[in-house]
Image (cartoon, rainbow, N blue to C red):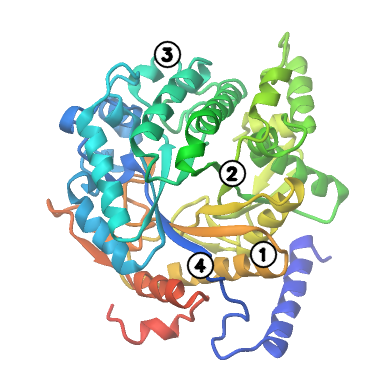
Amino acid sequence: MYTYRKIMKILLGTACVLCLLFRARADGIGKYKFTEDFLFGIASSAYQIEGGYKENGKGENIYDHYTKTDHKKFYNGSNGNIACDSFRKWRTDVKLLKELGVHFYRFSISWSRILPSGYANNINGDGLRYYNDLINELIEHDIQPMVTMYYNDLPMTLQQLGGWTNPYMAYYFEDYARILFSYFGDRVKLWITMDTSQKGYGDDNYPPYLNQPGIANYLCQHVMLLAHAKAYHLYDDEFRTIQKGKVGIAINSTWYEPGSFSPEDIAAAETAREFKIGSLMNPIFHTDGNYPKIVSERVDNVSKSEGYLQSRMPSLLPQEADYIQGTYDFAGLNIYTTYLVKQGYTGNNITCLNKDANVTFYQDPEWTKTNSDWLRVVPEGARKVLKWVKDKYDDPEIFITENGFPDTGEINDVKRIQYLQKYLKAILESIHEDEVNIKGYTVWSFMDSFEWTAGYSEKFGLYSVDFSDPDRKRKPKKSTSWYKKVIKERRVVDLKEVTSSLKG
């Protein structure tokens, strides 16, 4: 009997043959090009690359704290105390970015470097100077800064209050946003309020290790939405007229594909999308401005069946829903991989999400593996999630804020190039065939860096960093030459066009 995946492979195989017959071109990649106004960028985050964890008045964040107090939870006991040492080597890094030819650089600002205590009554001038110098250097080299205000590294003082489960975090984040807009908004025109990960709230795998599944993760999501909205309204009310920038949010946008043609699995996949993507996007981007109905109803019903007197997932009050709805200038989508979904949940590793959504997630073992257990190469999922977002949320302006491939650090990183080729081809098809409003694309990541609890074992960078060298020397991988050519020629470049002139 043919399974859903086998049938899909046959159909995809047929489609590939037709493509070869009717779409063949000299470049061997595809018929489409990126428009002249399309922006290419590359990304990093503060804790992952900066180092300087005690330098110039910086305060302690949750990763500073837990890599010190619970170092066994990090691969080889590693930490970001020095990381890539970008705190000292930022001028070198900007030169590399200039050589690469990117139009923008997405980086995050360390909250605790700007506000050592987490609160706005104590602004660290040295922290302001560091980011001010970085922004000026980028602009001097015609590279647009895309600033993420918050990326996983909450000040420890605020975590001690409950972190993103505490509703007052929205007010503290607004204060922090005001400082960033005030000091940098005259030059920064692309803002991302936050990367919306809830890791460590419903699990014990990442800081802050709250491990209250089905409660803390929903509270985290709720408060993050309110914090984002506060920052957006602040910009709208007090800064937009003069600064004329844009404010968005970055959302992990894995695609969830039904594991079979059965109505049950098709419905399960859509439920998974609503839980994983819609729970964050719906309140901001949908005209109804609230959590997806299926998510609220399922959590409410499961909560009652478990003996709770009220839903484990907080409701958005009407005034909160109105406040959050429409708080975007663009959607930032982090796109890496795809999961298959079937109805029901079984096994020993049952999460609260499995129970609440009544689904099981898995991946096809035949999909190409990477150096991260969770990431397999499924470029068609990128096109599907982009189309889903377009159709569901009335065609918002989209930046792909992350897309990348982990390996073990090869300089001759052919597999990374092949991954990026496939995903960029899918993105071009999204633009030209599905008419998705994609304005820019960001490779994750600029250089090999501290990948959270995986330490330095997973290498996403286009540049290699020698972490055994006190000077943290950078070395370009083959993907740098490939991406540089993609940017310059605005097309998906064939591997053979760049590797013949490079030495491994």
User: Could you tell me if the residues under marks 3 and 4 are in contact, i.e. CB atoms within 8 Å?
Assistant: no
Q: Amino acid at mark 3?
A: Leu
Q: Which residue is mark 4?
A: 419
Instruction: Identify the image quadrant of residue 416.
Output: bottom left
Mark 3 or mark 4: which comes first in sequence? 3
Q: Which residue is mark 3?
A: 161
Alpha carbon distance from label 1 to label 3: 43 Å
Mark 4 or mark 1: which comes first in sequence? 4
Kindly identify which numbered label has been placed on residue 283: none
- On the image, the x and y values in percent for residue 484 come to 38, 72
Q: Amino acid at mark 4?
A: Tyr
- On the image, the x and y values in percent for residue 499 come to 37, 82
Kindly identify which numbered label has been placed on residue 430: 1
How busy is the neighbourhood of tag 1: few (under 14 within 10 Å), some, or many (20 plus)? many
Labels in figure, total: 4
Rendered-image quadrant of the N terminus: bottom right
Farthest residue toward the right?
Answer: 263
Farthest residue toward the front?
Answer: 242
Instruction: Tell me the element at label 3.
Output: loop
Is residue 81 depicted above or below 144 in this figure? above
Judging depth in this view, the residue of 61 and 466 nearest the camera is 61
From the image, state whether disc 2 or disc 4 is nearer to you: 2
From the image, state whether disc 4 or disc 1 is nearer to you: 1
Judging depth in this view, the residue of 427 and 475 nearest the camera is 427
The residue located at (27%, 19%) in the rendering is 122
Judging depth in this view, the residue of 153 and 357 nearest the camera is 153
Instruction: Tell me the element at label 2.
Output: loop
The residue located at (63%, 35%) in the rendering is 280
Kindly identify which numbered label has been placed on residue 329: 2
The residue located at (12%, 51%) in the rendering is 470
